Image: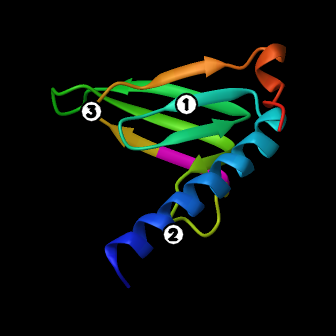
Amino acid sequence: MSAEDLERYEAEMELALYREYRDVVGIFTYVVETDRRFYLCNAVDVKVRSETGDAYFEVTMTDAWVWDIYRPARFAKNVKVLTFKDVNVEELANTDFEPPKA
């Protein structure tokens, strides 16, 4: 497989992922961004932990969809993320549910 073939494959996978996102975004309530992943979910809880002195975030999500091109199953019932980096949680407004016109 050439580098060009690999780039084409990744571009096709990214486009398929975007289309899947566009199709499912309407069934979720929250957008959660961590340093490594982007999630859609219906329930999210963020706790700041500091048992060892360093603060970190424990993010728990329910009914989640994960933006990950290499993941064969992007839907997950429960997700827990531990991170030392920033976490962004946004509640989707009704206007965010409108996918772009094809």
Name the residue beneath numbered marker 3: 84
Name the residue beneath numbered marker 1: 32
Q: Nearer the viewer, residue 33 or 7?
A: 7
Q: Amino acid at mark 2?
A: Tyr
* Quadrant of the rendered image containing residue 83: top left
Residue beneath the point at 38% across and 43% down: 36
Calculate the distance from the C-alpha at mark 2 to the C-alpha at mark 3. Answer: 33 Å
User: x and y percent of residue 6 in the render?
Assistant: 41, 72
Residue at the far bottom in the pictured view: 1
Q: Amino acid at mark 1?
A: Val
Name the residue beneath numbered marker 2: 9
Residue beneath the point at 34% across and 24% down: 86
Mark 2 or mark 1: whose residue is earlier in sequence: 2
Relative placement, left or right, of 52 versus 75 is left
Q: Which residues are magenta?
A: 76-80
The prevailing secondary structure element of the residues shown in magenta is strand
Calculate the distance from the C-alpha at mark 2 to the C-alpha at mark 1. Answer: 27 Å
